[in-house]
Image: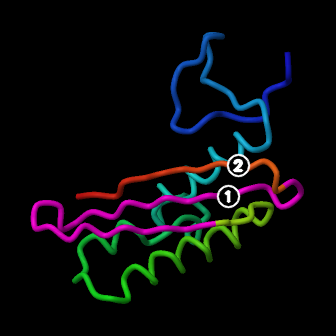
Amino acid sequence: MAEPIGVRIPIRLGNTGFFEQTLTSIDEAKSNMYNLLLTQKGERYMQPEFGTRIYSKLFEQITTSIKDEIETDITDAVGMWLPYVELMKVDVDISDDNIDANRFDVRIEFGLKRDLNQYEEIQIIFAT
């Protein structure tokens, strides 16, 4: 059995009685992506620049530039905190209807810079 690398995010109970663990580099990178994107800047103790400002954009007026701002925020955060990750695609979908006016659907395809044959995809819904 492979040695664990880290804890899978979102955290949940594994079959060993501990938290579920990641066993491959790409799975650990996926957990790190979730951790980075779901953390708001200023939220992490002693690391105020860790995370993104995506949640704060939920309450801003929807403009033509907000999608680009979110994509740039994600790209900058990954470049700073996950330099071993290569972003292949960042797609932000902003709801047009009045029911979910405060919602962003983010889909990211990424790989490891050392081996782009391994890639993953995550999808996160940011909503109020």
Residue 110 lies within the magenta run: yes
Q: Which mark is residue 20?
A: none
Q: In this view, does 64 lie above or below 35?
A: below
Q: State left or right for residue 48 relative to residue 114.
A: left
**Residue at the spot 28% in from the left edge and 87% down from the top edge:** 63
Q: Name the residue under label 1.
A: 110
Tag in front: 1 or 2: 1
Identify the residue at the far left of this view: 98
Q: State left or right for residue 59 relative to residue 79.
A: left
- Secondary structure state at the residue bearing disc 1: strand
Around disc 1, counting alpha carbons within 10 Å, would you say few (fewer than 14), some (14 to 19), or many (20 or more)?
Answer: many
**Residue at the spot 23% in from the left edge and 73% down from the top edge:** 59
Q: What residue type is labelled 1?
A: Phe
Q: Picture quarter containing residue 75? A: bottom right
Q: State left or right for residue 46 relative to residue 2.
A: left
Magenta-tinted stretch: 89-115
Where residue 1 sits: x, y (%)?
A: 85, 15
Q: State left or right for residue 69 relative to residue 126.
A: right
Q: Which amino acid does label 2 sit on?
A: Ala
Q: Mark 2 points at which residue?
A: 29
Residue 106 lies within the magenta run: yes
Q: In this view, does 43 lie above or below 57?
A: above
The main secondary structure of the magenta stretch is strand
Q: Distance between the residues labelled 1 and 2?
A: 9 Å
- Secondary structure state at the residue bearing disc 2: helix
Around disc 2, counting alpha carbons within 10 Å, would you say few (fewer than 14), some (14 to 19), or many (20 or more)?
Answer: many
Tags 1 and 2 touching, CB below 8 Å: yes
Q: Is residue 126 above or below residue 32?
A: below
**Residue at the spot 56% in from the left edge and 59% down from the top edge:** 108
